[in-house]
Image (tube, rainbow, N blue to C red):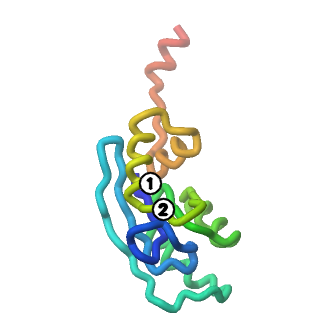
């Protein structure tokens, strides 16, 4: 599962989604995690109501299941959710590596319902009709 982190310093989740200079993407499994890519968005990201600045960010994380943010505006949150990405707000700046460690442990156990739903992103739903036939006999 791919996870994105809104960051200014590329070390901590410390950025508002719309103002983030970077979105760091990692691939996370129960066995570990690996850095995938850092998407940079420049310096001129002041709060200005410019919704167009969201499009490149949404495109960059289109295949992520989760994005961790320090904050996110209502319209941006709606667009993230519409893209089937689950936004997670952290209460204070937090090291990305700490979040990755916790997420890896959670994936190895019994993930909560919201995380199971996020894990299903991009997977084709399949039904085993053979099992159904056994029930109907």
Closest to the observer: 93 or 83?
93
Which residue of the protein is positioned furthest toward the top in this rendering?
A: 137
Q: Position of residue 113 (x, y in %)?
A: 58, 39
Compared across the picture, whether 21 is left or right of 72 comes to left
Compared across the picture, whether 42 is left or right of 15 comes to left
| Residue at 38% from the left image edge and 64% from the top image edge | 25
| Residue at 46% from the left image edge and 77% from the top image edge | 8
Compared across the picture, whether 4 is left or right of 54 comes to left
Q: Position of residue 37 (x, y in %)?
A: 33, 69
Q: CA distance from mark 1 to mark 2?
A: 8 Å
Q: Position of residue 30 (x, y in %)?
A: 35, 41
Looking at the rendered structure, which numbered label has been put on residue 134? none
Q: Is residue 131 above or below residue 79?
A: above
How crowded pointer 1 is (Cα within 10 Å; few <14, some 14-19, many 20+) is rated as: some
Closest to the observer: 13 or 127?
13
Q: Position of residue 41 (x, y in %)?
A: 44, 83
How crowded pointer 2 is (Cα within 10 Å; few <14, some 14-19, many 20+) is rated as: some
Tags 1 and 2 in contact by the CB under 8 Å rule? Answer: yes
| Residue at 44% from the left image edge and 54% from the top image edge | 99
Which residue of the protein is positioned furthest toward the bottom in this rendering?
A: 44
Q: Which residue is mark 2?
A: 94
Q: Which residue is mark 1?
A: 99
Nearer the observer: mark 1 or 2; the answer is 2
Compared across the picture, whether 99 is left or right of 86 comes to left
Closest to the observer: 50 or 94?
94
Q: Earlier in the sequence, mark 1 or mark 2?
A: 2
SS type, badge 1 = helix
SS type, badge 2 = strand
| Residue at 51% from the left image edge and 19% from the top image edge | 132
**Quadrant location of residue 85?**
bottom right
């Amino acid at each position: 599962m791919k996870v994105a982190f809104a960051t200014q310093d590329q070390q901590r989740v410390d950025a508002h989604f719309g103002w983030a200079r970077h979105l760091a993407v990692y691939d996370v499994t129960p066995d570990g995690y690996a850095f995938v890519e850092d998407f940079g968005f420049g310096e001129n990201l002041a709060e200005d109501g410019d919704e167009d600045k969201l499009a490149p960010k949404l495109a960059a994380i289109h295949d992520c299941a989760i994005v961790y943010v320090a904050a996110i505006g209502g319209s941006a949150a709606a667009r993230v959710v519409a893209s089937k990405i689950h936004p997670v707000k952290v209460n204070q700046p937090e090291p990305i590596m700490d979040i990755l460690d916790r997420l890896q442990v959670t994936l190895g156990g019994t993930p909560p319902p919201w995380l199971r739903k996020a894990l299903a992103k991009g997977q084709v739903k399949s039904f085993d009709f053979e099992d159904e036939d056994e029930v109907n006999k």
